[in-house]
Amino acid sequence: MWPHLVGFAALGALAALFGRFAPLLKRHGIVWICAVMLTGAVFVTFLASWQGTPAFVAVLMVACVAGVATMGFSYWKLGGPGAVIIVFAAGAAALIAYAAGWNHPSWAAIGAVAVMQGAHLHITLHRALQRMASTLVGALIVWFILESQPPFWAIVGMVVIFQFITEVVIGYNYALGQIATTPMALLMTYLAAPVADATQMSVERVFDTMLGAILGIVFAVVFSTWDDRRYLARLQREQRAGGRK
């Protein structure tokens, strides 16, 4: 009856991705907390939109939600990065995309937050490269799917499949998990607000993610410790030396 709301149901189901390695009883608590946080984030942004909040204010709210969520994940030990600085990266990874006139600045914020989840600088850089490459592959998959103009329930079924693949794979291989996450997110977006040009949406996803990842790297480098930078430099020297052998 309300096909445009199906994507939100899939969004709520993402709470099941958290606490996958925790004991069963503890995971129940983690999933419930994450479900409340997901619902609260959607509710807050819905109220802002309902009240006619200007777009740039809504983008700033996304950054605030990212910061509050980060502190919550750290406090309850839910597996989040625990770095309050993410709120600044998300606010920048989103405002620049909004200023450029892109339709989905929140994707840039997601890109920045995702790559900054690494505990160390070298992990952040690896995540950024993996996320950009995986997003490109995932966007191509979505373009191929939507160009064939599948019926509504076929898209719903594919969202479920990609969500299952994400749950199974992302804990073991971040890059492969992102290849499944990108089609899931884009198809959920399409269900909520169908667009005529699937190519444009896929291209925007790629550019938004690249912008977010690049800004995430910049913030990670600026706020990294000297020990992190020295360790990264040593890794690069070892890799170059290994390549010459």
Image (cartoon, helix red, strand yellow):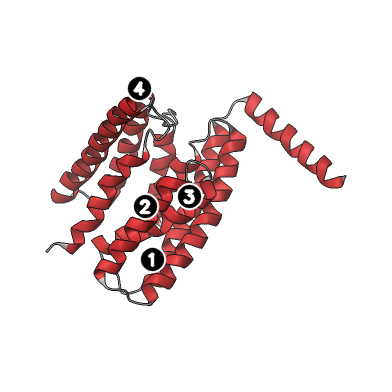
N-term-proximal mark, 2 vs 3 = 2
Which residue in the structure is indicated by mark 1?
201
Residue 72 lies left or right of residue 220; in this view the side is left
- Packing grade of label 3 (10 A; few <14, some 14-19, many >=20) is many
**Mark 2 → mark 1, Cα distance in angstroms:** 20 Å
Q: Secondary structure at mark 2?
A: helix
At x 44% / y 39%, what residue is drawn?
89
Which residue in the structure is indicated by mark 3?
177
Depth check, mark 4 against mark 2: the one in front is 2
Q: Are marks 4 and 2 in contact (CB under 8 Å)?
A: no
User: Is 200 above or below relative to 211?
Assistant: below
Q: Position of residue 217 (x, y in %)?
A: 55, 42
Task: Report the amino acid beneath label 2.
Answer: Gln
- Packing grade of label 1 (10 A; few <14, some 14-19, many >=20) is some
Which residue in the structure is indicated by mark 2?
163
Depth check, mark 1 against mark 4: the one in front is 4
Q: Secondary structure at mark 1?
A: helix
Depth check, mark 2 against mark 1: the one in front is 2
At x 43% / y 32%, what residue is drawn?
21
N-term-proximal mark, 2 vs 1 = 2
